[in-house]
Image (cartoon, helix red, strand yellow):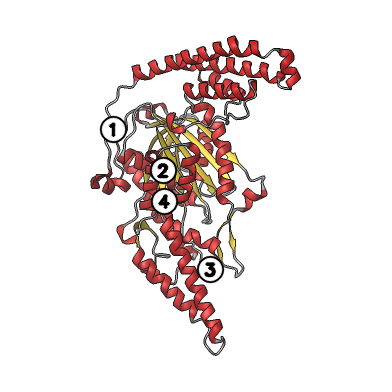
Amino acid sequence: MPTNPVYLVDLYVYKPPEELVVSMVDVDVAWNERRKHEGSIFTKDTLSEEDQAKADAEAQDIIDFQYRVWQKSGLSDNATYLPKSVHPKFCGNNPKTDMDSAAAECRMAVCGAVEGLFKKTGLRPKDIDILVTTCSVYCPTPSMASMVVNAFGMRKDVQAYHLGGMGCANGVVGINMVADLLKAHPNSNALFVTNETTTPAFYKGRDKHRLVTNVLFRMGGAAVLLTNKRALIPRAKYALQHRVRVHCGASNEAYKCIWYGPDAEGLNGIYLGLDVVKEASKGLTYAMMRVGRYVLTWGQIGQWLWTEAQRRLLGRKDVAPYSPCFGDCINHFLIHAGGAKVLDGIGKNLKITESHLWPSRTVLRYYGNVSSSTTWYTLAAVESLRGVRKGDKVLQIGVGSGIKVGVNVWKALHDIEDVHDAWRMRAEAGDRTRLPNVQHGALHFGLRLLSLALLALLLALLVRFVVPLTHPSALQAGGVGPGLEGLMASVGGVVRGTAQRLLGGGGEAAAAAAAGSGAV
C-alpha cells in the first residue's frame, strides 16, 4: 500500500438527454447540404464548367472521407450525443462555435456530472476541500473550476484548479495532481471533474487532418470523488496503488502530431498527424515498461528471468525479448477509447483479449470519444455491466496530445455491482454479465506460494548449471562478463522482493528490487 493512500469513493458519468442523440440520418442530411452549399459558392459566371465540376468533386470527396472515418470509427449510427450548437438536427449546416454556446454545453455536462455525484454519495458541496477540473480546448475566464464553485456554492477556502490544453490523457494524468494535493492536505476530500466541450473544437473547414475529430468526438463529462479521510475509507470502492506519467514532448515528432490551431484558411480545428499512432505507441510502451514492474505476476517475472538468462548469459540472439501478456496480471482495463483502431493497437501491444477490450469498445459505441472522460465511462461500464471483485486490479490508460501517457493502477476494496445511470439502459437490455462466485483468499495465497517456489527453483538452476558453464575468463573474452554479476544480483533482488511481497509487508522493497533489475 502506498505511503500516502488515495481512495476513490465513487464516480458519476453524465448521460445527456435523449433529444441530443446523434442519428446518422441527420448527419447525412447535413453533409449533403454542405456539399450543395460548397458547390454553389461559385456560379457559372465566375467558374468554368470544368472548374465547377472539380469543385463539386472536391466537396463530395470530403463527404466520402467522413463516411469512411465514421464506418471504421466504432461509433453507433444512433446512440452518441452532441450539444445543440453543433448537432445537425438542431443547427443543420450552420454549427455555432461561439463562447456562449460553449459555456452552455460545458455547464450542462459538468454540472450534470457533479450534481449526480453529490446525489449519489450524499456529500454536500461544502464537504469538498480540493477541486480539480480539466478541459483541453475550452478554457474560459473565469475558469471551469470557478464555474463549479459558483454553481454549487463551495467554500471560500476550497483549493480549486483548472487544467487546460492537456488533451485526452488528462482524465488519467490529472490523478497525479489530485493525489499530490491530497498528500499535501491530509484528511481531505477531492473532486476531480473531466470534460471536453465539443462546441469550440468543432471544425468548419475542409482539411481532412482536422475533420476526423468532428466524426469521433462527442459530448460528456465525469465527476470523481477521491479522499484520504479515514471516515470515508470504509465507503471507498478503490485504492490507488500506482500512478505513472510519461511526457514525450521533448521529441518534435511527438509534440507536433496533435495540436489545435488554424488551417490554411484560418479556421481552427484539432490537427491529427499521420504519425499519431506511432508516437502514441512509443509513449505507451515506455509507460507500460515503468508500470509493469509493479503489476507483473511472479510467474511472468520468472519467464522474464529465463528469457534474459538465455539472451544475456548464453548469447541466444534467436530468443526474442520477453513481452508480457497484461491480461494475466490485470482484471479490468480502462483504455482511452480514441477510436476503434486505437483500441486494436493497444490491445495487440498489451496482448489482451477482446473480452478485456469490450468495455472500452462499448463506451466508444454508445458515447463516442469523450476525451478525458472516456476511461471513467469505461469504469462505470465495468461496474454496471460486469462487476468488480474485491482484490481485482484495474488498469487505467490515457493517451493524449504532447504526447502524454498516464497509467493508474487501482485495487478494488470490496465487491462492486453498481448500475450507473449512464449504463442503466444497456444493463436492462441484457448486456450485463453477473460476477462468477469465486473464493479468492486461499486460492490466491496458494498460487503465490507456488510462484515463489518456482522462482526459487529457477534461481537454483541458474546458479547450478549456467554459472559453471560461463567461466569469468571466457565471459570477459566474449565481452559479456560484466553483465553476469549484475544479472545475478538482479535475480537475487527480484526473488528477495518477491518473497517479501508474497508473505506480506514488503511491497515497496519489492518494487525497488524489480525497478533496479530492469525487468521491464
Numbered disc 4: secondary structure: helix
Marks 4 and 3 sit apart, C-alpha to C-alpha, by: 28 Å
Q: Which residue is mark 4?
A: 110
Type of amino acid under label 2? Trp
Q: Which residue is mark 1?
A: 435
Q: Earlier in the sequence, mark 2 or mark 1?
A: 2
Q: Is residue 484 visible?
A: yes
Are discs 3 and 2 less than 8 Å apart at CB? no
Q: Nearer the viewer, mark 4 or mark 1?
A: 1
Q: Residue at x 46, y 75 (%)?
A: 35
Residue 251 lies, in percent from the top left, at 66, 46
Residue 420 lies, in percent from the top left, at 31, 43
Q: Earlier in the sequence, mark 1 or mark 3?
A: 3
- Count of all numbered marks drawn on residues in the image: 4
Q: Nearer the viewer, residue 395 or 199?
A: 395
Marks 4 and 1 sit apart, C-alpha to C-alpha, by: 32 Å
Are discs 2 and 1 less than 8 Å apart at CB? no
| Image quadrant containing the C terminus | top right
Type of amino acid under label 3? Gly
Q: Nearer the viewer, residue 165 or 465?
A: 465
Type of amino acid under label 4? Val
Could you tell whether 173 is left or right of 311 in the image? Answer: left
Could you tell whether 208 is left or right of 312 in the image? Answer: left
Q: Which residue is mark 2?
A: 376
Q: Earlier in the sequence, mark 4 or mark 2?
A: 4
